[in-house]
Image (tube, rainbow, N blue to C red):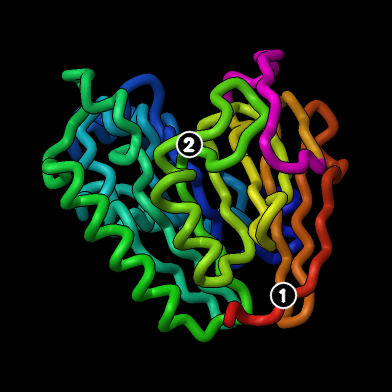
Amino acid sequence: MGVVGEKLSADFIISTGDNFYNDGLTGDNNTTFFKASFTEIYTAESLQKPWYIVLGNHDYTGDALAQQSPAIREVDSRWASVNKSFIVEADIVDFFLVDTSPFVLKYWNESKFDWRNVAPRDTYIANLLKDLEDALTESKATWKIVVGHHPISSGCEHGNTTELREHLLPVLKTHGVHMYLNGHDHCLQRISSIDSPVEFVTSGGGSKAWAGKFKASTDKMEFLYDGQGFLSMHLTRRRRTSSFRTSPAPSCTAGASPSRPPPPAS
């Protein structure tokens, strides 16, 4: 990852969630575990850039507020988890980071989830979607990319997230989003929507890969790798090139998807 970051002169890194296994951080004083799981892992010079973070379901079974704490950012200033949902504006591209765990109904039946500042669910989701719609409407970026932990469309173990297809996907289609990027499934995949320009990309190959469990996709599977790796992306005003960097061959690229931005939604 450090080699790729140096080659591309990476501006920043995005984490698609489940940042700390198995149960997130126990609090913002859980600094030894934070350092062992992040600071002491990503040591390459090219990775000493801002890391923008969404939470996964495993982060929610610990202290779900700890990762946004200033105390954690004091330990490592790269850690840019400033809110559970926020926008990264990078000139030609806007990344809209969305908190997806509260959408998933089954989690609300499990007592171990930390729903402080989230409950009641319906109000939280309604406000999140309203804020996202407003931000997408106002965005003047060439590229609009939404990032969440859970997949909208997936052919790997977890498959589609029903609640996101019902509530989040219509927002992406309406507002001309080019890509939805997620984790959760421990694989790498690129899927084309069968009825919109949205591309669904999973970059969840950081841990516990090679599960060998698949589900039929309701959209068009373009690339799937059931192993470890990560996604790199290079953007210009007229072209986006996304490449999966896979293990055990970290120097190879697979699933590259050069594309041009479609015309704005009318």
Where residue 152 appears, as percent x and y from the top left, is 54, 42
Q: Residue at x 70, y 41 (%)?
A: 219
Q: Residue at x 47, y 75 (%)?
A: 89
Q: Residue at x 81, y 43 (%)?
A: 222
Q: Which residue is mark 2?
A: 40
Per the image, label 2 sits on a secondary structure element best described as loop
Where residue 63 appears, as percent x and y from the top left, is 20, 33
Q: On the rendered image, what quadrant is the N terminus found in?
A: top right
Crowding at label 2, few (<14), some or many (≥20) Cα neighbours within 10 Å? few
- Horizontal relation, residue 94 to residue 2: left or right: left
- 91 or 127, which is in the foreground? 127
- Horizontal relation, residue 246 to residue 46: left or right: right
- 189 or 2, which is in the foreground? 189
Q: On the rendered image, what quadrant is the C terminus found in?
A: bottom right
Say whether residue 74 is visible: no
Whether residue 212 is in magenta: the answer is yes
Label annotation for residue 242: none
Q: Residue at x 45, y 63 (%)?
A: 96
